[in-house]
Image (cartoon, grey):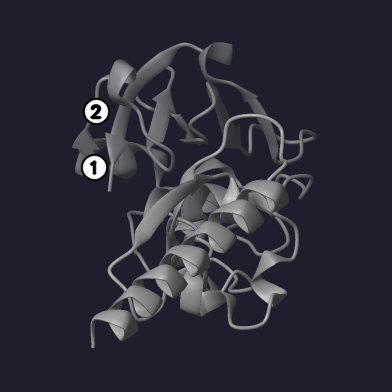
Amino acid sequence: MAKHRRQTATMTRRIATTAVVAASATVAVPGVANATEVVIPNTNYSFDVQGLDQVPNIEKVPNIQTYVPSLGEAQNINYNATAQAAPAPAKSEGQKVVDAARSVIGAPYGWGAAGPSSFDCSGLTSWAYGQVGKSIPRTSQAQAAQGTPVSLDQLQPGDIVAYYGGASHVGIYTGNGTIIDALNSGTPVQERPLDYMPIHSAVRF
């Protein structure tokens, strides 16, 4: 029995020595390397080898997972899985109003017209809101009077800006320091600076 134990211990040492020599000879990679645990099957022996996980094609060595369990764990990772793209943020109702107004830039001005081929100022604002399913007053004065007042430094896309004394003109704030409006006869729907005309007030629906 003593002889058998000596042979078993000797064989284990040889296996461990061979594994260390083989790993040391194989790992010849430059740069900073991580330590990888190598185990000797059927023993309590294990040791760390620097850079073993960086050896090209090491995972193809027969039974390598028996000696290097971490390589088997790495193979379970699906590197080909495509990351799910984050969904685009939903547009606000106000931005949808702006988009509707922007879609008719270039349409001619028409007194009393409320789209879809021509517009006056309040006709454009009421039409744009209608495209998102919201009904607002038809005239510029009623829009300025019935919306929720908003200070100019709190403007958001889709807010209605009224101009001149008595709120005789309105436009849709875009969020970029501009409005979209139907100004007057001979001038098509277009985008212009917020302060192009004297501002009366601003409201939100």
Q: Is residue 135 left or right of residue 195?
A: left
Please state the horizontal and vertical placement of residue 22, each as a whole percent of the image: 65, 57
Describe the element under mark 2 as helix, strand or loop: loop
Please state the horizontal and vertical placement of residue 29, each as a whole percent of the image: 71, 40
Decide: is 197 above or below 100: above
Amino acid identity at mark 1: Gly
Q: Quadrant of residue 179?
A: top right
- Label number found at residue 79: none
Write down the residue under mark 1: 147
Quadrant where the N terminus sits is bottom left
Residue 180, visible in the rendered structure: yes
Spatial distance from mark 2 to mark 1, Cα to Cα?
9 Å
Amino acid identity at mark 2: Val
Describe the element under mark 1 as helix, strand or loop: loop
Please state the horizontal and vertical placement of residue 97, each as a whole percent of the image: 48, 53
Q: Residue at x 43, y 49 (%)?
A: 48
- The residue sitting at the bottom extreme is 1
Please state the horizontal and vertical placement of residue 35, each as a whole percent of the image: 46, 45
Q: In this view, does 136 lie to the left or right of 173?
A: left
Mark 2 Cα-neighbour bin, 10 Å: few <14, some 14–19, many ≥20: some
Decide: is 29 above or below 70: above
Judge by depth and name the residue closer to the eye, 90 or 193: 90
Write down the residue under mark 2: 150
Q: Residue at x 65, y 71 (%)?
A: 59
Judge by depth and name the residue closer to the eye, 74 or 107: 74
Q: Which residue is drawn at 72% across and 41% down?
A: 28
